[in-house]
């Protein structure tokens, strides 16, 4: 008999209505009844029950029977399982905005603290990829996995990492490059930790409507070896 893998019921595979139900429970501290969920989400109670049953089966929510001090049938309440990641990016975006807001107060236009944060991030990514082949090509895979769609290109003998899609674009509106400085440090830290023969000398955000350019230069170690 052929065995089939169990379906993936993780939060990233939820449909839009089921995601709304789970998102509301994640944003609410107290366990919530079906009727309140239906009212707040403008859904029929039977629709809410249908989606709650599926979320329960997937282990994404918990069912709680209310303890009451008075006589009467106890209510059945629901809450999000505490270990389930948020189904919206609002908590992460709020945290990012807080970090960027602090870094923007740096009077140094080069924002060395932002670059240092990125370098530490890049080193941690390199440690996780210890089994991969070292080099700039490995950086492309890492950057793409972070949502920065990129490719290596060469023009007039100058190599660049072309970033053609960035999920943080709205954070750079008005010319703010704080997030870009973190990404610059991340790429430098990753390449240095992997022993690559190149580094990112410069990151130029939005040189075109859909293009950022990270210029690749020989690393200091390589230049020192060539001079020797």
Image (cartoon, helix red, strand yellow):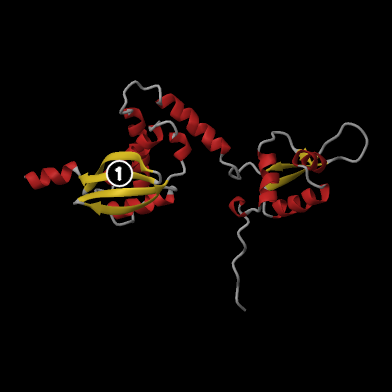
Question: Where residue 27 appears, x then y in whole percent?
Answer: 66, 36
- Residue 127 seen: no
Nearest the eye: 194 or 111: 111
Q: Residue at x 31, y 49 (%)?
A: 161
Q: Residue at x 37, y 54 (%)?
A: 141
Question: Where residue 222 appears, x then y in whole percent?
Answer: 15, 46
Label 1 Cα neighbours within 10 Å, binned few <14 / some 14-19 / many ≥20: many
Classify mark 1: helix, strand or loop: strand
Where 62 sits versus 110, above or below?
Answer: below
Q: Residue furthest right?
A: 71
Q: Residue furthest front?
A: 209
Write down the residue under mark 1. Answer: 214
Nearest the eye: 168 or 122: 168
Q: Which quarter of the image is occupied by the C terminus?
A: top left
Nearest the eye: 81 or 146: 146
- Residue 141 seen: yes
Question: Where residue 143 appears, x then y in whole percent?
Answer: 38, 48
Question: Where residue 36 appears, x then y in whole percent?
Answer: 80, 38
Q: Residue at x 45, y 29 (%)?
A: 99
Where 3 sits versus 17, above or below?
Answer: below
Q: Quadrant of residue 192?
A: top left
Q: Residue furthest bottom?
A: 1
Q: Is residue 1 left or right of residue 156?
A: right
Q: Is residue 199 left or right of residue 37?
A: left
Q: Is residue 136 left or right of residue 9?
A: left
Q: Residue furthest left?
A: 228
Q: Residue at x 91, y 32 (%)?
A: 70
């Amino acid at each position: 008999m052929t065995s089939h893998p169990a379906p993936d019921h993780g939060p990233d595979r939820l449909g839009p209505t089921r995601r709304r139900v789970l998102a509301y429970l994640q944003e609410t501290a107290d366990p919530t009844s079906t009727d309140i969920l239906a009212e707040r989400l403008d859904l029929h109670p039977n629709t809410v029950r249908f989606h709650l049953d599926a979320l329960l089966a997937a282990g994404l929510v918990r069912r709680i029977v209310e303890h009451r001090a008075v006589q009467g049938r106890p209510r059945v309440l629901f809450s999000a399982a505490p270990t389930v990641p948020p189904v919206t990016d609002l908590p992460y975006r709020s945290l990012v905005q807080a970090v960027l807001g602090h870094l923007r107060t740096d009077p140094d236009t080069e924002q060395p603290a932002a670059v240092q944060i990125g370098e530490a991030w890049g080193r941690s990514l390199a440690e996780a990829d210890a089994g991969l082949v070292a080099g700039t090509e490995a950086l492309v895979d890492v950057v793409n996995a972070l949502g920065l769609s990129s490719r290596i290109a060469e023009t007039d003998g100058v190599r660049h990492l072309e970033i053609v899609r960035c999920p943080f674009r709205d954070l750079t509106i008005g010319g703010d490059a704080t997030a870009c400085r973190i990404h610059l440090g991340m790429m430098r830290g990753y390449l240095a930790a992997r022993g690559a023969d190149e580094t990112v000398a410069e990151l130029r955000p939005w040189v075109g409507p859909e293009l950022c350019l990270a210029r690749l230069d020989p690393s200091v170690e390589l230049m020192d070896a060539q001079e020797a």
